[in-house]
Image (cartoon, rainbow, N blue to C red):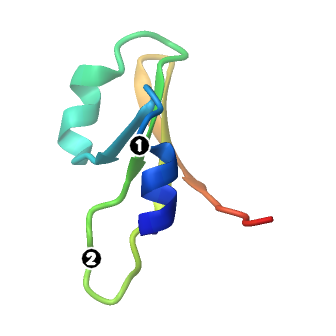
Amino acid sequence: MAVVDKQLAGELWYHGLLPREDIKQMLRSNGDFLVRTTEPVAGKPRALVLSVMVKQEFEDQGVRVCHS
């Protein structure tokens, strides 16, 4: 994940380790989005998540990273 984090670090929409509680303050209008890294959980690797504001609620979708 560290390599991906470095590649994304310069993007305006990437927010690294961002708690879910902070997302509500950042996504205000339909279509607003950000990409974040999930918080560490015992036994699970960190993952990238796309958070999008849809109908005044935010939805999370996992992001699969493909290396070519």
**Relative to 33, is 6 above or below?**
below
Residue at left offset 19%, top offset 40% = 21
Residue at left offset 22%, top offset 22% = 25
Residue that badge 1 annotates:
9
Q: Looking at the picture, tell me which residue is in the foreground, 24 or 15.
A: 15
**Relative to 17, is 2 above or below?**
below
Q: Looking at the picture, tell me which residue is in the foreground, 60 or 9.
A: 9
Secondary structure, mark 2, is loop
Answer with left or right where residue 43 lies relative to residue 34: left
Residue at left offset 52%, top offset 50% = 7
Structural distance between the alpha carbons of marks 2 and 1? 22 Å
Secondary structure, mark 1, is loop
Q: Where is residue 2 in the image (x, y as percent from the top left)?
A: 41, 67
Please, what is the three-letter code of the amino acid marked with disc 1?
A: Ala
Q: Which residue lies furthest to the top in this view?
A: 29
Q: Where is residue 9 in the image (x, y as percent from the top left)?
A: 41, 43
Q: Position of residue 62 (x, y in %)?
A: 56, 56
Residue at left offset 49%, top offset 64% = 3
Specify the quadrant of the image occupied by residue 65. Answer: bottom right
Tag of residue 41: 2
Q: Earlier in the sequence, mark 2 or mark 1?
A: 1
